[in-house]
Amino acid sequence: MDRSKLKSVMAWIVSVLLALAFLGAGLPKVLGDQGWIDRFAGWGYADWFRPVVGVVEVSGALALLIPGFARYGVALLALIMLGAGYTHLAAAEGLEILRPLIFLAFLAFVGWTRWPGSPRGNRGEPTR
């Protein structure tokens, strides 16, 4: 397998795994899971903010799976992860900051492979 094809396959694998993770995190927020309600209240956020974050997570996850929209999904989810990192820092939650940083690294990889002007372009299709 040549290098560009391997990069494309890896981008798809990471995109699907990220999409599953963000769907798994976003849907409970949208559906009003009590654990998320309690966390957002503990962080001092208004109740309306939780489903907004959930909708952005779900939207970003779905966008990751559509080649022409993946870069927008990366941007949305990166903003959410920056906000999550800020929240964990402001709440003095110590190592909880690592999770958003790890997700940001994976999002950066997907963005690098899907952004226009990258060797893969914005389609994420294998080269011929």
Image: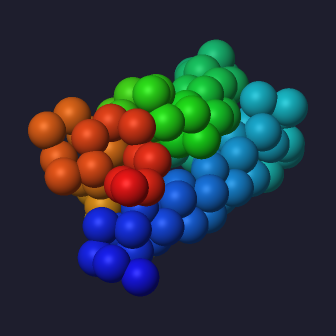
Task: Depth check: give the residue in front, 13 or 107.
Answer: 13
Location of the C terminus by quadrant is bottom left
- For the rendered model, the colour scheme is rainbow
Vertically, is 103 above or below 46? below
The x and y percentages for residue 86 are: 30, 48
Residue lying furthest left in this view? 117
Q: Is residue 128 visible?
A: yes
Residue lying furthest front in this view? 128
The x and y percentages for residue 87 are: 38, 48
Residue lying furthest bottom in this view? 1
Vertically, is 118 above or below 104? above
- Image quadrant where residue 20 sits: bottom right
- Image quadrant where residue 4 sits: bottom left
- Image quadrant where residue 58 sits: top right
Q: Is residue 100 visible?
A: no
Task: Depth check: give the residue in front, 15 or 41.
Answer: 15
Task: Depth check: give the residue in front, 116 or 44.
Answer: 116
Location of the N terminus by quadrant is bottom left
Vertically, is 11 above or below 31? below
Query: In the image, what residue occupies the spot 53% across and 41% down?
Result: 64
The x and y percentages for residue 32 are: 84, 33
Position of residue 22 in the picture relative to residue 128 (left or right): right
Query: In the image, what residue occupies the spot 49% across and 67% down?
Result: 9
